[in-house]
């Protein structure tokens, strides 16, 4: 369980590659052979897709990924210019050495499985009464066998941190990969079984024993999958918030030695926990008693080796790629080593890298300009709430209070993370240093228990190309990484800025009022501030919106999941409407002067569509439909905009055209 359980993240960003001039609306992105009323996504993005065929190192690559690549290249420039004689213990030494260790392919290949063998030897000796300590050790930043734990804000008391226990242990990430019978899922499942066997062989098991171990691991994960909550069920906080005392936890799950578990994590005097999925934890409790000791040992060994595999020799890293990237996503070749090596310090020392990043790449005046845009979007959303026909005055007041209580974080944090307690030792192997960094982060997370919630903390690094809404603190956050052209371009016209970064802002604001965010009040507490009648009307509209997405075919005969993607769809829908209203309050929005042959309204919608210009493999489309709460790009355009009358007017969409949607079938929520 990660903090992202409570983060409503919007995959929102794009830019041209570093060094290239940016056109706010580039005619080269268009497909002149497709009419806007036929397929707007293809019309707006077809030229871009044709000019940017999918590189085999990607399963999806679009304008969003271009901006991520730009940010990655900026970080590479920073890290590769740190020098090699930095004082031991300095940030530059830690970042530079961690990157260099990942780049040393000769050393990694010469070491092979050696960095794991001592820990594996210990795992092979475990007896039943030692399993809980081993599980806790892996939960301390390494892997999540059987279940997981995390410290986060109490859903009903946002100022207090609480311990949470949640379902986990599934290497393929989602229960449906273990249970579904369609051809693609069966193919992925077979690849996973082969991958497990391959890892066991790489650590010294003969083929027969490796095959047996793989069968045992799959059996355990399949049993966990059978009792796991569905993706849709995990969106319902009322089902997740199951607070219990420690005494009751011990009584309900007696085969898990909780004193050992929490003691290993350094947690003492715990009085209560929240069990997200009691049914799943009950299954773990049963399995820890009923399974053979050898089966549990093999499962724990696999989870450990699986976690380490991307950071070992080419044999391990290639096996990991073939499973998680090729089989699951359709990628054909690995990314260059520097990208993988860069991602390690960029993640594990994220704010240290971020501090260097903003000094070089984030102009001081960008924060001020972004704040003005946020203020304009807040005003527009407030106007929308005030004029909603389906919401009662009482609920409107509560909604407006929540809106006006938003905390806005832009660019980078006011205080930086302290990494002085982390030692990166280049004399040790790469995996040992990664474990040290992971445990340093994990111990920091667990240390928050018993402390007030840190409302100044950021849950994304400044260089991250993304944005989020966090309900427990009622905050919206826009890291510096996403605040680049053409999303945030001072030289672009308002139509393009509002169609891009404006929709990002509106999207994150609307997350506070989507099917999950609406359950939290202005203080970030899970409180029902709705009248029953308004809640019912909201759900009716949300269901109608969800049905629009579920009607879309993803690939083969697989439909999109409008229920699982509900929150992001509502945020896209609201973000578009609110950003458009804010744009119409600008000088350009009030007029109708064309630029390069496009009216202001047309430029707004074209800018939004270009956010999602991308090429993607069929495997990745199917994978994302299982695990990603965001709709595919084509649906974030073609489904979302067909609820806006302004879109139909802008491009003269008529009833006989495929993009048309009858007024009675359109949805307006926010």
Image (cartoon, helix red, strand yellow):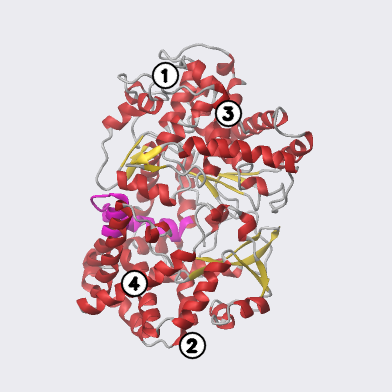
The residue where tag 3 is placed is: 577
Is the residue 561 above or below the residue 16 in the image?
Answer: below
Q: Secondary structure at mark 2?
A: helix
Q: Which of the marked residues, 1 or 3, is nearer the chain's N terminus?
A: 3
The label number, if any, that marks residue 342 in the structure image: none
Residues 481 and 548: in front is 548
Q: Is residue 470 left or right of residue 283?
A: right
Contact? badges 4 and 1 (CB < 8 Å): no
How far is the residue under mark 4 from the one under mark 1? 54 Å
User: Vertical placement of 130 versus 193: above or below?
Assistant: below
What residue is at 50 percent from the left and 74 percent from the top? Answer: 284
Residue under label 1: 657
Task: Count residues near mark 2 (Cα–Cα under 10 Å), then give few for <14, some for 14-19, many for 20+.
Answer: some
- Looking at the picture, how far across and down is residue 625, in whole percent? 41, 47
Name the residue tied to disc 2: 129
Q: Residue 482: where, in percent of width, then height?
A: 47, 41
For the C terminus, the image quarter is: top right
Q: Which residue is mark 4?
A: 305
Mark 3 burial class by Cα count in 10 Å: few <14, some 14-19, many 20+: many
Q: Nearer the viewer, mark 4 or mark 2?
A: 2
């Amino acid at each position: 369980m990660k903090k992202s359980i409570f983060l409503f993240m919007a995959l929102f960003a794009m830019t041209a590659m570093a060094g290239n001039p940016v056109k706010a609306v580039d005619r080269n992105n268009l497909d002149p052979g497709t009419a806007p009323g036929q397929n707007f996504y293809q019309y707006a993005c077809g030229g871009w897709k044709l000019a940017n065929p999918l590189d085999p190192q990607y399963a999806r690559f679009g304008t969003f990924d271009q901006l991520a690549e730009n940010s990655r290249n900026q970080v590479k420039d920073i890290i590769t210019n740190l020098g090699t004689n930095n004082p031991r213990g300095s940030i530059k030494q830690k970042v530079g050495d961690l990157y260099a260790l990942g780049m040393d392919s000769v050393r990694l290949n010469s070491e092979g499985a050696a960095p794991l063998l001592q820990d594996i030897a210990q795992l092979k000796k475990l007896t039943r009464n030692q399993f809980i300590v081993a599980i806790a050790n892996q939960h301390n930043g390494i892997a999540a066998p059987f279940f997981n734990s995390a410290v986060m804000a109490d859903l009903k008391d946002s100022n207090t941190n609480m311990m949470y226990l949640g379902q986990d242990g599934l290497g393929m990430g989602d229960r449906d990969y273990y249970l579904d019978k369609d051809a693609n899922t069966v193919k992925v499942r077979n690849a996973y079984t082969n991958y497990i066997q391959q890892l066991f062989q790489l650590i010294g098991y003969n083929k027969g024993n490796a095959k047996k171990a793989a069968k045992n691991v799959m059996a355990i994960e399949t049993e966990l999958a059978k009792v796991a909550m569905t993706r849709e069920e995990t969106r319902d906080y009322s089902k997740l918030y199951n607070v219990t005392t420690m005494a009751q936890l011990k009584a309900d799950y007696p085969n898990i030695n909780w004193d050992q578990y929490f003691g290993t994590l350094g947690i003492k005097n715990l009085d209560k926990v929240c069990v997200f999925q009691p049914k799943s934890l009950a299954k773990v409790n049963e399995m820890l008693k009923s399974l053979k000791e050898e089966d549990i040992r093999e499962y724990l060994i696999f989870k450990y080796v699986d976690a380490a595999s991307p950071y070992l020799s080419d044999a391990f890293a290639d096996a990991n790629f073939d499973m998680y990237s090729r089989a699951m996503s359709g990628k054909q070749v690995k990314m260059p080593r520097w990208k993988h090596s860069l991602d390690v310090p960029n993640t594990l020392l994220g704010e240290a890298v971020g501090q260097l990043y903003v000094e070089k790449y984030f102009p001081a005046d960008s924060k001020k300009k972004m704040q003005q845009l946020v203020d304009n979007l807040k005003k527009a959303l407030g106007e929308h709430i005030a004029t909603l026909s389906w919401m009662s005055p009482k609920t409107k007041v509560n909604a407006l209070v929540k809106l006006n209580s938003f905390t806005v974080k832009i660019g980078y944090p006011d205080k930086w993370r302290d990494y002085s307690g982390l030692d990166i030792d280049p004399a040790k192997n790469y995996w040992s240093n990664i474990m040290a960094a992971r445990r340093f982060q994990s111990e920091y997370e667990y240390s928050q228990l018993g402390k007030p919630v840190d409302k100044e903390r950021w849950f994304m690094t400044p260089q991250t190309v993304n944005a989020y809404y966090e309900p427990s603190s009622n905050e919206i956050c826009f890291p510096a990484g996403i605040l680049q052209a053409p999303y945030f371009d001072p030289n672009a016209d308002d139509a393009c800025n509002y169609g891009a970064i404006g929709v990002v802002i509106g999207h994150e604001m609307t997350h506070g009022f989507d099917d999950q965010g609406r359950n939290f009040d202005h203080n970030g507490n899970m409180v029902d501030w709705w009248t029953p009648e308004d809640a019912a009307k909201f759900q009716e509209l949300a269901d109608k919106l969800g049905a629009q997405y579920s009607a879309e075919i993803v690939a083969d005969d697989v439909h999109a999941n409008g229920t699982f993607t509900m929150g992001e769809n509502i945020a896209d829908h609201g973000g578009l409407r609110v950003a458009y209203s804010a744009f119409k309050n600008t000088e350009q929005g009030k007029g109708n002067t064309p630029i390069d042959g496009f009216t202001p309204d047309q430029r707004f919608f074209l800018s939004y569509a270009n956010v999602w210009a991308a090429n993607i493999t069929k495997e990745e489309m199917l994978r994302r439909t299982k695990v990603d709460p965001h709709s595919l790009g084509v649906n974030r355009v073609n489904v979302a905009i067909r609820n806006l009358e302004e879109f139909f007017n802008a491009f003269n969409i008529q009833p006989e055209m495929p993009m048309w949607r009858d007024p009675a079938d359109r949805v307006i929520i926010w």
